[in-house]
Amino acid sequence: STISNHMPTAELQALDVAHHIHPFSTQEDLQKKGARVITSAKGVWLKDSEGEDVLDAMAGLWCVNIGYGREELAEAAFRQMKELPYYNTFFMTTHVPVIALAAKLAEMAPGDLNHVFFASSGSEANDTNIRLVRTYWQEKGKPEKKVIISRWNAYHGSSVASSSLGGMKGMHAQSGYIPDMHHIDQPNWWSEGGESTPEDFGLERAQQLEQAILEIGEDKVAAFIAEPVQGAGGVIIPPSTYWPEIQRICDKYEILLIADEVICGFGRTGNWFGSQTMGIKPDIMTIAKGLSSGYQPIGGSIVSDEVAAVIGATEFNHGYTYSGHPVACAVALENLRILEEEKIVDTLRDDTGPYLQEKFRSLAEHPMVGEAQIIGAMGSLALTPNKATRAPFKAETGTVGYMVRERCFANNLVMRHVGDRMIISPPLVITKAEIDILIERAWKSLDEGM
Ligand code: PLP
């Protein structure tokens, strides 16, 4: 029979596990529990094949910023598919959706970030960045400037190059590791700050960049890349001293600064870009996810006038079949129109954001929560058996985060866990009533996870 939403859940799950390899999952888990089958969605709500309504406090994978079910985006895709479903911009051609989106992004991005190279994902965009910064330094007559410095626990994508750039050791172990990448520690004061103040700790962690540059040699370092707020590494909001020091060091040693805005971009931190929230001036920004609110796969690199001018002096030997895909561009443009016209980022910054932050911080009163950190609409709870010492749960307790996440899921709330940190990153359109439901379900799940 035809495979459809009308099939019994167990049959869909059996076919799924038989033929579909899931990202970041084990076959054993899938076999034991069966994947939850999501059939439709609206606003912040997912519907599953059993008819349950699930509050998606992760906006999919941190991407559905405008919420699910916006028909305008479907119509934009339909119109574009009828008119020009595909063309590329290799070899002296272009098309209107790509021109319009590049111009729109140049207008929105801060400073002189005025030039966009498109990809279909954040991983591809970060691969682009590796080639971009190396080409940049070759063209500047410094081809030995190749090393890119990043941070442990950073997530910059899943391709072999972007995962080497990232700092997830489990990924390095499986895929191998491309050379000329170097990692420094993350500014995670809660777990690693010990007795120091957050401010001192932020400075100390930023100064690791300077030490690394001096050790490697400034004539060998091309760029530093970081997420303004580390996302998949656990929503690590850096102490206030961190970013100003990083900016100072990049300026001093002529190191290109790449802000990976794949999560932080398009409103997540309460401004259009995380770089604005953190007060930094990157030379390159990686974008994806919220650019189309996940309705189409699209990402890119936005670069400064200077970087574009240097790269433009040569042929950039780089491009994806779907770079600047017209349908993805049309959908992204419509998404940006909605974000702007409905003042979604302003509402988050001035109204629903402060409400969400206050409610989320109240979860720190739960006996198992050591700290509740939140900026804009991205937050994390550090789970601990001892709030005073900020101790982690012992390994033999199992991953408490995993257990709490399972309880959330059973209570129809999607939260994610990273070790013993619980994460939220809901659609930016979440209402106050929905925030109340989120907090209530999170508290209940924490109680059950103890
Ligand atoms: N960079 C950051 C900061 C991310 O969070 C992600 C994905 O989560 C990526 C890059 C990779 O993006 P994609 O999954 O679209 O390849």
Image (cartoon, rainbow, N blue to C red):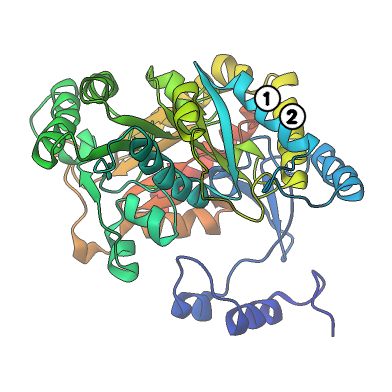
Q: Position of residue 389 (x, y in %)?
A: 13, 39
Relative side of 253 to 156, left or right: left
Q: Which mark is residue 152?
A: none
Would the CB of label 2 be found within 8 Å of ligand 1? Answer: no
Q: Position of residue 17 (x, y in %)?
A: 58, 80
Give the answer, above or below, for where 204 lies relative to 314: above
CB under 8 Å between callouts 2 and 1?
A: yes
Relative side of 330 to 261, left or right: right
Name the secondary structure under disc 1: helix
Q: Quadrant of the C terminus?
A: bottom left
Amino acid tagged 1 = Lys
The residue under the point 34% across, 40% down is 138
Q: In terms of depth relative to the viewer, which is nearer, 150 or 45?
A: 150
The residue under the point 56% across, 40% down is 300
Relative side of 386 to 367, left or right: left
The residue under the point 40% across, 42% down is 135
Name the secondary structure under disc 2: helix
Q: Quadrant of residue 228?
A: top left
Residue position marked by numbered label 2 in the rendering: 100
CA neighbours of label 2 inside 10 A, class few (<14), some (14 to 19), many (20+): some
Res 271 visible: no
Would the CB of label 1 be found within 8 Å of ligand 1? Answer: no
CA neighbours of label 1 inside 10 A, class few (<14), some (14 to 19), many (20+): some
Q: Quadrant of the N terminus?
A: bottom right
Residue position marked by numbered label 1 in the rendering: 104
Amino acid tagged 2 = Ala
Q: In terms of depth relative to the viewer, which is nearer, 437 or 338?
A: 338
Tell me how far mark 2 sits from mark 1, CA to CA. 6 Å
Relative side of 443 to 45, left or right: left
Q: Quadrant of residue 247?
A: top left
